[in-house]
Amino acid sequence: MLKFDMRALQEALDGERLGRKLTWDQLAAEINEPFKHTPSIPISVGTLRTMTTKRSVTSAVVLQVLRWLRRTPESFLAGRDQPPTPGEALPEAGPAQILRFDTAAIHAALDAKRREQGMTWSEVAGELPGFTPSMLTNLAKGPLIGFPRVMALVQWLGRPASDFVRARSK
């Protein structure tokens, strides 16, 4: 399983920011533009600048950064030697929409594969470092999930992250 490279994401973000001659405040304003007409909390400059210092970054932040960069989550998998496929493209979102993972759909897909392979939740968790069975079953209730963890789940499923990303107005 390939690991999501948060440092490469940060470098791509900063490189694009510098290439467009944006300050960190201007970058945050552009990334947060879709939030303007939603009840969601905008992403802070500090969060954007310090993503690599965190063990996990909420998927809402990473998805908005990826949207701004026009990149796929898979394009930041360390060691990946193939270009992104059209099926990996994140969904289009309207001007007042933000991207979110549908954790209930991730849970349903995990459960279907688990049943198909005759596995227990403990066995699935054993194949996914950093996960416990309860973390996996709790996805059905819709909690947020962060990067890089979410990428381990979609890789275990053998599906692109975009299969589980939805454009929402909150």
Image (tube, grey):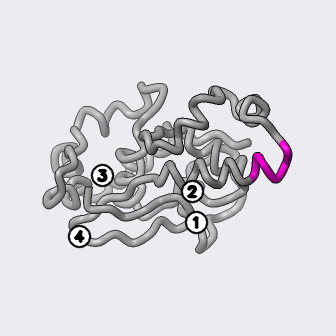
Q: Nearer the viewer, mark 2 or mark 3?
A: 2
What label sits on residue 88 in the rendered view?
1
Q: Nearer the viewer, residue 100 or 4?
A: 100
Residue 116 included in the magenta stretch of the image: yes
For badge 4, the amino acid type reads Pro
Which badge, 3 or 4, is on the more N-terminal residue?
3
Image: magenta residue range:
113-118
Placement of the N terminus among the 4 image quadrants: top right
Work out how far the residue at label 3 is from the one at label 4, CA to CA, in angstroms: 21 Å
Q: Which residue is mark 2?
A: 161
Question: Where does the image place residue 10, in percent across and percent down from the top left?
Answer: 42, 42
Question: Where does the image place residue 2, in percent across and percent down from the top left?
Answer: 69, 43
Question: Where does the image place residue 115, in percent across and percent down from the top left?
Answer: 78, 49
Work out how far the residue at label 2 is from the one at label 1, CA to CA, in angstroms: 7 Å
Looking at the picture, does residue 35 appear above or below residue 45?
A: below
* Residue 149 falls left or right of residue 52: right
Q: Which residue is mark 4?
A: 95
For badge 3, the amino acid type reads Arg
For badge 2, the amino acid type reads Ala
Residue 162 included in the magenta stretch of the image: no
Q: Residue at x 22, y 53 (%)?
A: 32
Q: Which residue is mark 3?
A: 17
Mark 1 near mark 3, Cβ–Cβ under 8 Å?
no
Q: Main secondary structure of the magenta part?
A: helix
